[in-house]
Image: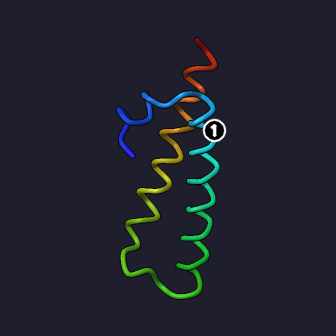
Amino acid sequence: MKQAEIKKLSVADLNDKLGETKKSYADLKMAHAVSPLENPIQLRNVRRTVARIATELTKREVQ
């Protein structure tokens, strides 16, 4: 998910997306521990998406 897409979402939508993305990351991480993923770069991309969403939420709280 790109930063421009994240900025368009409301705070409630961001919280929902954050939960979904964290769950997706946990699932990918578990699947990778059991048997290697075909594309392990997915882990990095999902982790960075979680960080982008969390950063946007923090930025909005400060404002």
Please tell me whether residue 26 is drawn above or below residue 52 in the rendered image.
below
Please tell me whether residue 33 is drawn above or below residue 4 in the rendered image.
below
Count of numbered marks? 1
Residue 46 in percent (x, y) is at 47, 56
| Left or right position of 2 against 17 | left
| Left or right position of 52 against 57 | left
Q: Secondary structure at mark 1?
A: helix
Residue 43 in percent (x, y) is at 46, 64
Q: Residue 54: which quarter of the image?
A: top right
Q: Residue at x 41, y 56 (%)?
A: 45
Please tell me whether residue 12 is drawn above or below residue 40 in the rendered image.
above
Please tell me whether residue 28 is drawn above or below residue 13 in the rendered image.
below
Residue 2 in percent (x, y) is at 36, 41
Q: Name the kind of residue labelled 1 in the image.
A: Asn
Q: Residue at x 60, y 28 (%)?
A: 11
Residue reaching furthest bottom? 35
Mark 1 Cα shell of 10 Å, populated few (<14), some (14-19), many (≥20): some
Q: Which residue is mark 1?
A: 15
Q: How was the colour assigned to the protein in this rendering?
A: rainbow
Q: Residue at x 46, y 47 (%)?
A: 49
- Seen from the viewer's position, the closer of residues 51 and 4 is 4
Q: Residue 34: which quarter of the image?
A: bottom right
Q: Residue at x 58, y 11 (%)?
A: 63
| Left or right position of 48 against 59 | left
Residue 25 in percent (x, y) is at 56, 62
